[in-house]
Amino acid sequence: MFANYLIGLREGLEAGLVVCILVAYLVKTERRDALKPVWTGIGVAAALALGFGCALEFGSQELTFEAQEALGGTLSILAVGLVTWMVFWMRRTARHLKAELHGRLDAALQIGTGALVATAFLAVGREGLETALFVWTSVRAAGDGSTTPVIGAGLGLATAVFLGWLFYRGALRINLARFFTWTGGMLVVVAAGVLAYGFHDLQEADWLPGLTDRAFDISGTVPPDSWYGTLLKGIFNFQPDPTVLQVTVWLLYLIPTLTVFLLPVGFASGKGKVKGPDEQGSRPSKAPQA
């Protein structure tokens, strides 16, 4: 439940911040006439995300077991890819998000109503689709048929809406860069479990070999139906008897991704790099004295 709460909170807060920035900018510039198309775009994006989630849930029920596993595994890998891109993008652009959105909105205001609807739709729709896909894959990974993951995501979204309202009212001030760094790091850990389970789905669909090759089996120590086994599965998608492929994929994703994510922003582009002797300006040398 906590993992899905985190997903709903982070994705919802991203969308909420976008909405707050758009609405506040229009109000501040006395363009309240543009609020209606903006809210229309937001509503269409929310409806699309909800419809996408329903299509995944009810559409997959008509498939055979192998087809369900193949679809679930493929979409799990896609969801991890989207979430990974999202956490890196937000960490890099959190400081400049407001200016970027203001620029887009200024351009849309010059074009007309349709551009305003499209701007709001695109700004919110991506988070909505990512949330629907990632929550659906997490629900499948839970595998117990409970509604706890959905409740967790719903509570996260509700918290995000409340925090977004506080941001808009000016009652809340937090370091967004730090917030998205901490939640992003936790989401990378969650995504590693979803990715490993996605590969397990592909093994059950007979798309990948090694379904019977167990890396270890600690079911006796951590029973899946125990409270701590359920807690580990709910947060990290932990499985007491994973395959060798699952453990390999988990390690190959988590270690390098988390390492790169926790590096200082701008490290990869060379900012803050110490210059070598060849890169530093040389001082004029004194002529040798006789």
Image (tube, rainbow, N blue to C red):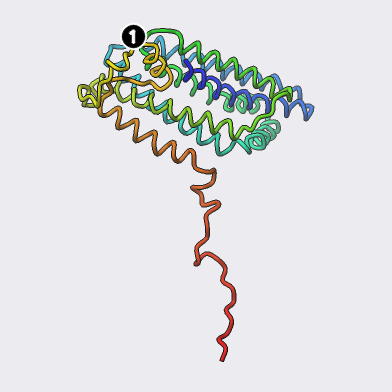
Residue 148 placed where, x, y %?
46, 10
Picture quarter containing residue 141?
Answer: top left
Give the quadrant of residue 97: top right
Q: Nearer the viewer, residue 290 or 38?
A: 290
Q: Residue at x 23, y 24 (%)?
A: 214
Q: Which residue is mark 1?
A: 62
Q: Image check: 42 left or right of 229?
A: right
Residue at 70% x, 34% y is: 106
Q: Is residue 140 visible?
A: no
Number of numbered discs overlaid on the protein picture: 1
Q: With 178 as the anchor, is 193 left or right in this view?
A: left
Residue lying farthest to the front in this orientation: 221
Residue 19, given in percent of the width and then of the height, sits at: 65, 24
- Name the residue furthest right: 30
Residue at position x 55%, y 17% in the image: 156
Pick the quarter of the image with the C terminus: bottom right
Name the side, left or right, on which 197 lies relative to 36. left
As displayed, is residue 290 above or below residue 162?
below
Residue type highlighted by circle 1: Glu
Q: Is residue 156 visible?
A: yes
